Image (cartoon, rainbow, N blue to C red):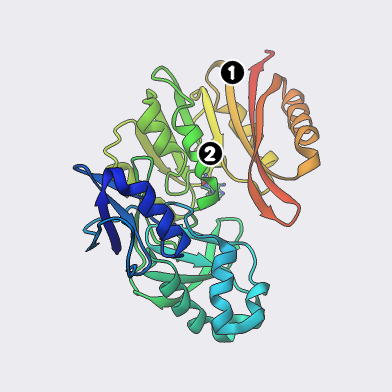
Amino acid sequence: MLAVVVEKQCAEVARMELLNLNLFDKSRYIISKAGRVEIPVLSPPEKLSVNFTLVQQDKSIFKAHGLSFSEMKEYLKDVVGERAELIRGGWEMIGDVLIISLPEELYAEREKIGKAMLDFHPRAKTVILRKRISEPLRKPEAQIIAGRKKTVIIHRENGVIFKLNPLKVMFSAGNFSERKRMAYISSPEERILDMFSGIGQFCLPLAKYSSPEKVIAVEKRPETFQFLKENIKLNKLENVEARLGDNLEVSPVNFADRVLMGYFFSPENYLEIALRSLRNGRGMLHFHAIIKKPELKVYGDRVVELVRKEGYEAKVNYNRIIKSYAPMVWHAVYDIEVRSKR
Ligand SMILES: C[S@@+](CC[C@H](N)C(=O)[O-])C[C@H]1O[C@@H](n2cnc3c(N)ncnc32)[C@H](O)[C@@H]1O
């Protein structure tokens, strides 16, 4: 990737000039090295008012959200004209795989669109078209539309390694902030049950940074479970036990101080097992749900009511919207503190 190199004291002047010339590449960070500064550029400037040299960077640092969805749609107008406006829902970047959804009227042109997206996004090596994610096991229905055919990738996030195949298993880039929150939520004396662990999206950051005594991670789908097991090894985590099976059958009893319920399809069906898994009948549930935004509080009250009916005291300690899921529909999480009355 191309960059302009200038002395540190000239960096701000050069950056402003490149910005005015529309040559500054906003998708990458400026890098400071031994008194000199590398400013990422889209193409070489003819001249600047300060001395500069041009380099091909050995290492570029990309911003996670350097490029906007509307910029991408503008770019795609060269390929599909105004119909680019029909594309909704943004994109996800997992490792170097870019995932998009397209409206059906653009399926016939998917390969052209895929190639344009490879040109547009400097980090993308493969473009995947995701049609839908099937329930109950969150299996993506997806296909490669451009680029490299290899899709088993390593995605690094906050120092955690996630190996996965985005064609086969689900990984939501939009849950980034919740993965970060979970990393520091626990402590060394706690035991954790992750009832819907997937490839370890929540429990691996938690196991790594909170160092709980033990984590039991349950996953029902064998293909996803294989990645979970590999990821435990890749992250060298000795405090995580992976269990293959339905959490309604294989969850431990009287074990956990904290239960992760990262699955939002009829999550109330799993409350009884979550409560049964708590050590001495008390602990914290991280309960995920799909809600309409104005219902954030009311929905939490309803879950608390369900928990009380099972013979527990319960209160919502914290709630928040994690991401938009569909128009007017939101993915939310509730931290519910519970204690058995018996
Ligand atoms: C949506 S993914 C979520 C992964 C992670 N919790 C997150 O939110 O990023 C849900 C995972 O739960 C698994 N799952 C669904 N029902 C399950 C059940 N009854 N027992 C165990 N795993 C289940 C699915 O196979 C899937 O991998």
**Given the image, on which type of amino acid does mark 1 rest?**
Arg
Residue 32 in picture, x, y percent from top left? 27, 45
State the residue lying farthest toward the front.
49
- Compare residues 126 and 229 and report the one nearer the observer: 126
Q: Secondary structure at mark 1?
A: strand
**Which image quarter: residue 164?**
bottom left
Q: Which residue is mark 1?
A: 282
From what the image shows, is residue 63 above or below residue 255? below
Label 2 residue near ligand 1, CB within 8 Å: yes
Indicate the position of residue 330 as horizontal and vertical percent values.
69, 47
The residues bearing labels 1 and 2 have C-alpha atoms spaced at a distance of 23 Å
| Image point (76%, 52%), residue name | 328
Instruction: Residue at 44%, 65% (x, y): give it.
Output: 21
Give the camera-side residue of 269 and 210: 210
- Residue type at mark 2 is Glu
- Quarter of the C terminus within the rendering: top right
Q: Where does label 2 land, which residue? A: 178
| Left or right for 147, reference 173 | left
The residue lying furthest to the bottom in this view is 108
* Residue 116 in the image: above or below residue 191: below
Task: Characterize the local packing of mark 1: few (<14), some (14-19) or many (20 or more) Cα atoms within 10 angstroms.
Answer: many
Q: Is residue 32 left or right of residue 213?
A: left
Look at the picture and state if 123 lies above or below 211. below
